[in-house]
Amino acid sequence: MGARISAIPALIERRPVLAAISLGLIAACAYPPLHLWPLGLAALAGFVWLIYTVPTKRAALWLGWCFGWAHLTLANNWIATAFTHQAKMPEALGWVAVPLVCMYLAIYPALAALAAHLLARRAPLPAFALVLAGTWVLAEWARGTFFTGYPWPPVGLMLLGGWKAQGLAALLPWMGTYALSGLAVVLAGLLLRALIARRWVATGAGVVVVAASMHFPAIEVTSPSKGLNYTLVQPLLKQSEINDASKFEEQFVRLADLTMPGREQSRIVLWPESAIPDYLEEGYPERYYFQTTAGADPEFARRRIGAVIGPQSTLLAGVVNLDIAARKDGSLGAVSARNSVIALNGDGDIAHHYAKAHLVPFG
């Protein structure tokens, strides 16, 4: 068995690019819904060894990119599935778009690998794993911040337990998601060190501790309150008809029919993000209200929504709010738009609103 295990690092060294891509794909299988975290940690350990043993900084950068590209492409395949719901886009476009976007996202794992190689290539393996954990944390932060940011998925997600367990994610309130990713890299490095050194007792003990932690049950928080009544409305509006003005009233009637039951209760009502075409804020030039707003009057549009949800209800829904200012040609009009969520009460008043502050690429 020892000889077989020793052959794994040698195999990785002989086919580094293939190994990097394979390890990236395997590591992505640790995420929900598969939850194959043992495979994920093993693949991450293989990646640590791969970067630890590369001879040049160019190789570290290239192999880090290959691992990141394969890993992020598989982990984000759900984006391709979303293209099947876009009526005006070919479904195959999703399977092209995801790998292309991940070619950019993979730059961050590549930089993490390069930085670890430059800083700790001559250090003992545990120290190298610790440095790689630090550079990986910085890379994940950068990936979620620069150029609008796209943080999904953090590699720490593999430490989330199954559907009925929280695993090492129980540490999130104290560590945060970035540090949890660093912990995943450190654990992989330590298990790799014990395995290569053939310290079977240490390896077995580490596996047992991690496995036990991963099955730590989710903590159920009990509340003295009776809970919150809510109505979640899914009208199944066709994507191709959402912006069709001739369908606006039909869509509102469908929303109203699904919302009216229970309007006498105190509750939260949730409508889909694009369900309200109306401009509900006051103060826009009238031409904007004529285009999309019921009765060409934002107050009327708000009041009829309030009548639908009921006097004790609050609606949470996504709307578009405009920023009106003087344009270069001297006319008054929209200079920008904000994708916002509003809280609208039964009187038709907007109690609160929040505009998205951090959009992902193409989002």
Image (cartoon, grey):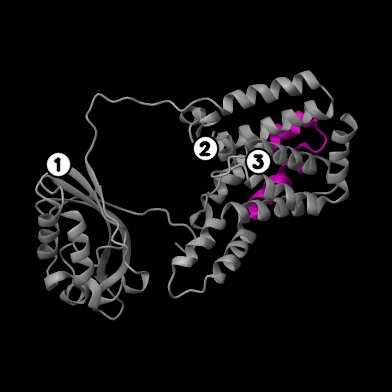
Residue 277 x/y as whole percent: 25, 67
Q: Which mark is residue 235?
A: none
Was residue 107 drawn as part of the magenta stretch in this picture? yes
**Quadrant for the C terminus in the image:** bottom left
Are there few (<14), some (14-19), or many (20+) residues within 10 Å of tag 2? many
Residue 288: quadrant of the picture: bottom left
Which residue type carries mark 3? Answer: Thr
Looking at the rendering, the stretch of residues picked out in magenta corresponds to 106-132
> In this rendering, does residue 35 appear at all?
yes
Are there few (<14), some (14-19), or many (20+) residues within 10 Å of tag 1? some
Q: Is residue 287 above or below residue 278?
A: below
Was residue 159 drawn as part of the magenta stretch in this picture? no
Q: Which mark is residue 177?
A: 2
Asked whether the beta carbons under mark 2 and mark 3 sit within 8 Å of each other, the answer is no
Which residue type carries mark 1? Answer: Ser
The residue identified by callout 3 is 135
Residue sitting nearer the eye, 172 or 19: 19
Name which of mark 1 and mark 2 comes first in the sequence: 2
The answer to whether 222 appears left or right of 344 in the picture is: right
The residue identified by callout 1 is 266
> In this rendering, does residue 58 appear at all?
no
Are there few (<14), some (14-19), or many (20+) residues within 10 Å of tag 3? many
**Quadrant for the N terminus in the image:** top right
Which residue type carries mark 2? Answer: Thr
The answer to whether 89 appears left or right of 244 in the picture is: right
